[in-house]
Image (cartoon, helix red, strand yellow):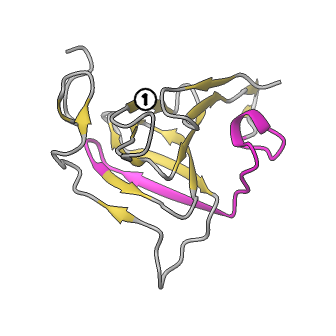
Amino acid sequence: MIEVKEYDLPGVRTYDLRISPDERGFFSEAIRGDWEKLIEEDQIVQINISFSYPGIIRAWHRHLRGQVDYFLVLQGAMKICAYDDRDTSETKGKLVQIVANSQKPQIVRIPGIYWHGTKTVSSEPSLTVYFVTRLYDYQNPDEERRPWNDPTVVDPATGKSFDWNRPPHK
């Protein structure tokens, strides 16, 4: 049975991967179709790789046709954020921040209905594999975008515009 952590936005979850080390290195399952607590009824249909230099922010975007993203950071560390601004949502205004890194591999699940993005927070580049539940449509992409510093994304902890560069201890 897998241990899944739930967050303030419904559907945002993490699962710490189980590492099986031996004298050669280690082995780990990245994602399995029978991990219902993590993936529900999602079906992974595409796998992507993202490499980002330190300090690079890739935000904000969302998917309105039901795509779910699963992030796995293989190198470095990355802050992964999700924000709900839907007027009809009970979680309107909530923001989730998760720091994932290669030293403690985990899967981070982000439903595409939330605005989401990433920032490499390590001193080395980040290498991320992400699994998605919808094929990318080149002619009609399922993406809405906002600038990374969009002032309408409000940090509930400060009541001000979300600052990707705000130190975590303040």
Q: Is residue 50 magenta?
A: yes
Q: Residue at x 74, y 25 (%)?
A: 21
- Picture coordinates of residue 142, whole percent (x, y): 47, 69
Q: Is residue 14 left or right of residue 4?
A: left
Read off the magenta span.
30-58
Q: Is residue 161 above or below residue 168?
A: below
- Picture coordinates of residue 72, whole percent (x, y): 56, 42
- Picture coordinates of residue 1, whole percent (x, y): 83, 24
- Seen as rendered, the residue at the extreme top is 169
Number of other residues with Cα within 10 Å of mark 1, as a class: few under 14, some 14 to 19, many 20 or more: some
Residue situated in front as seen by the camera: 166 or 13: 13
Residue pointed to by mark 1: 99
Q: Quadrant of residue 13?
A: top right
Where the C terminus falls, by quadrant?
top left
Q: Is residue 70 left or right of residue 148?
A: right
Residue situated in front as seen by the camera: 123 or 160: 160
Q: Secondary structure at mark 1?
A: strand
Q: Quadrant of residue 35?
A: top right
Q: Is residue 169 left or right of residue 42?
A: left
Residue situated in front as seen by the camera: 40 or 71: 40
Q: Quadrant of residue 135?
A: bottom right
Q: Is residue 27 above or below residue 150?
A: above
Q: Residue at x 18, y 26 (%)?
A: 159
Marks counted in the figure total: 1
- Picture coordinates of residue 157, whole percent (x, y): 26, 21
Q: Is residue 9 magenta?
A: no
Q: Residue at x 39, y 42 (%)?
A: 84
Residue type highlighted by circle 1: Val
Q: Residue at x 43, y 29 (%)?
A: 99
